Amino acid sequence: MKTTSPDIQRVARQHLKTSELLGVDFVPVRQDKAAAERVKAKTQALEELHQRHDKTCPHCTASTDHTQTVFGEGNPDADLLFVGEAPGEQEDRTGRPFVGRAGKKLDDIIHAMGLKREDVYIANVLKSRPPNNRTPLAQEVEGCSPFLTEQIQIIEPRVIVTLGGPATKLLLNTDIGITRLRGQWARCLFGETEIDVLPTFHPAYLLRNYTVQTRKEVWADMQAVMEKLEE
Ligand code: URA
């Protein structure tokens, strides 16, 4: 016997009802589809932002000290976003964030959290390398950082970890130093979305000050992040 469309719908409804009675309260296939559509839309939005940034960023288009911009990379739908300071020499050469020594340390931290680099998103306050890796100037941050804000609004992570002073200063809109702010949660508004932000030490600082104390502090911060992501 040929099954008509209303029959299929009735059988599907019965199946869902039975599943519900058995305690199944989600349909994985639909969730996967919704997630895939979200990733596609965010990938496209990030790509458009990337192109617009490279054409119009007042800082990066005027700067002559870099060879290429470093937009950021990772899962466009990540729950966790790391924000660093600015590309260094290796990042400038490869066009990828955190691939030098500090990047290897960040990779270690991400792996210790039970995550892979592809699970998270990694970006910087500035998308082009300052001369001699100096700290970004206020006017450079003012020019480039609106693109980071847009990037955050597209990704909509559940948690942002600011790595070091400049990222913390920017996202928390504060002049208080990283040593006082690290480990303290803040809630920041990006567009209409409030996001939990946790400042921690920059991996380069950790490499320069590789003590039991600094390692313990960063690990405590990452444990707090994992707990927040499990909520
Ligand atoms: N330091 C940063 O802050 N960002 C990078 O991408 C690399 C090193």
Image: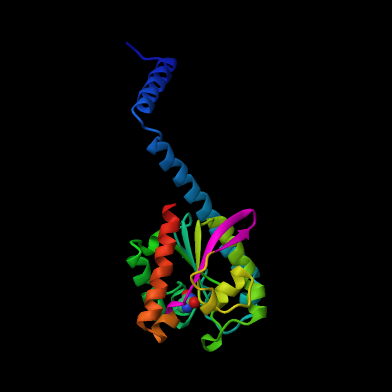
The one nearer the camera, 228 or 127, is 228
Indicate the colouring scheme. rainbow
Please provide the residue range marked out in magenta: 186-203
Which residue shows up at 41% across the image and 81% down it? 206
132 vs 222, left or right, is right
146 drawn magenta: no
Which residue shows up at 38% across the image and 19% down it? 11
Give how far across and how far down residue 132 sits, in percent: 52, 89
Give how far across and how far down residue 117 sits, in percent: 38, 64
Q: Choose top left, top right, bottom left or bottom right for residue 105.
A: bottom left
Give how far across and how far down residue 165 sits, in percent: 55, 78
199 drawn magenta: yes
- State the predominant SS element of the stretch in magenta: strand
User: Going by the picture, which residue comes out furthest to the top?
Assistant: 1
Give how far across and how far down residue 68 sits, in percent: 52, 76
The one nearer the camera, 40 or 231, is 231
Q: Choose top left, top right, bottom left or bottom right for residue 131.
A: bottom right
29 vs 191, left or right, is left
